[in-house]
Image (tube, rainbow, N blue to C red):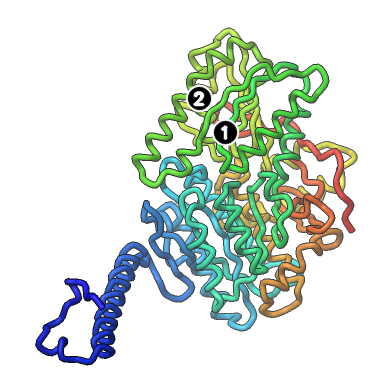
Amino acid sequence: MRVPRMLRVPEQWYGNLPRPMRIGVVAAVVTGLVAGSFGVFALVDHFRNQPCMRGGATAVTQHGANGECVGITDGSYPFDTRLKGVEQAIRKENRDVTREHPKDYVSVVVLLPISAHSGSIMAMSAVVEQVRGAYTAQYYANRQNVEGVAPYIQLLIASDGYQANQWKAATSAIEHATAQHVAAVTGLGLSLDGTRSAVRELTARNIPVVGSSITADSFSDIKNFVRVAPSNEDNMAAALSYVQAATRAVLVEDGNAGDSYDATLVSGFRKFAAIPRHRIVDVEPFDTTKRDRATSESEQAEAEQEVATRISQMALDICAQQPAVVLFAGRGQDVGVLVHAFASTCLDKSIEIVSGDDMSNLAITPQFRHDLNGHVTVDYAGVAHPDEWTSAHDPAAARDEQDGARGFRAFDQTFQRLFPGGTLTDGNTMTAYDATLTGVSAVRLTEQRQPRADAVAGELGALQGAHQVLGSSGPIRFTANYQTSRTGSNPVGKASPILRLGRDGNPQVLKVAWPAAAPPVG
């Protein structure tokens, strides 16, 4: 056996050993070196995944190229300074629950892509609103009858980081929080590949997941998953019914295949051409793939600039086509660039931009407000608005409108008590409240003190009829039929408010659109 130079040992004793013993010595040396190398790799991994905070119900660790802190917390660890106030309130509520009801509580996790990076689709203001909504539901449920008064609810906050790219670490933290009696996960917020992977991972382990503002059609039929927002298919049908008077459209479409929201928005808006005597006269493409996959702030900034440059180039071409409407199949954060481009272009024509519910993630800056003071309007199919039930007047939906108004009053009274003067106009807080309240309803329908997650998942289909959820955005009900339906995860008969951004940047209700048909419920 030839011994490598780096492994050679002194000949005066090694050479006198029997051959089997010499082989054993070499094997021992090799084993030691390999073990040492694994120790080095473990040390490197340790420094790469440094704990941001560990202890009790908190397990938050650095992950990814940006070193973001992802994981789960009971409010002890603030993922961002802007979350500190609401997380402190959640922490206090959690301590009261676990101290006073140690054998009669479960945890509901609100999972969101919390990131301070500028390219993040979900702005930090939207994250704060969603956490506030989840906390409002926790506070309400711990004091009111929501399918009973127990078990009590501990609310945990989890982050899967920038664009949900660290979903593996976040779902692992949730799955390992067994001591916290995790019964359901809510939130999620964005229809991205990482979000879908997180949903698939959790639901495969029979942990029920309730989406808040997820609308992409690729989430319409996932077992153990439901969502309180209408699907993009339903939202786009509502938007197209609103713009039927316009017969010529330009379609602005994002080619990012990894963004399920944008992809299904594109397919939904393409149906405009199927309306008799309607035409899409031009398609203006852009692509946000590079931005979503950026692994450093410099990459994000570069990709952001590329997207902005491409969108700003569209205004002249769109103007030349003289469309009656511009259908924007992309994220809300990118609409501002197009609006700004039109501020100095096509000044002799009215430009109407129509988009989907992600407009709630558009940053309303002074520049954007200034740009809206011209000839451009921005309308979109939303998922919730505080004025929805004072604007809805459909005799065929009178009962749902009454239930919607009742659900909103219960929410608003609690929210204003917790956050006096807080704004609700973009719907983020309302949908997060509804998702968490839905999770709580399923928990309590089990009639168990500390139900397992799989028992809670089994109650999702019970949330209809007498057990519908009185949400702030309207009555919420599900069939949870994943066998013979392609829409088992979707709410049944959920209305979509059609909204217009006012010149102050706040949305106003234009109308409330109800789906033309809905599957039967019990």
**Residue at 49% in and 52% down:** 165
- In the rendered view, tell whether residue 489 sits above or below residue 57: above
Q: Between residues 472 and 117, which one lies in front from this camera angle?
A: 117
Q: Residue at horizontal 69%, vertical 34%?
A: 267
| Residue at image coords 52%, 64% | 90
87 to the left or right of 8: right
Query: In front of the other: label 1 or label 2?
Result: 1
* Above-or-below relation of 508 to 478: above
In the shown orientation, is residue 373 left or right of residue 183? left
Secondary structure type for disc 1 = loop
Outermost residue to the left: 12
Residue ID for mark 2: 311
> Which residue does the image show at 50% across and 63% down from the upper left?
89
Q: Secondary structure at mark 2?
A: helix
Q: Amino acid at mark 1?
A: Gly
Q: Is residue 38 above or below residue 245?
A: below
Q: Is residue 261 above or below residue 341?
A: below
User: Which quarter of the figure has residue 385?
Assistant: top right
Q: Which residue is mark 1?
A: 255
Q: Quadrant of residue 317?
A: top right
Amino acid type for the residue under numbered disc 2: Ile
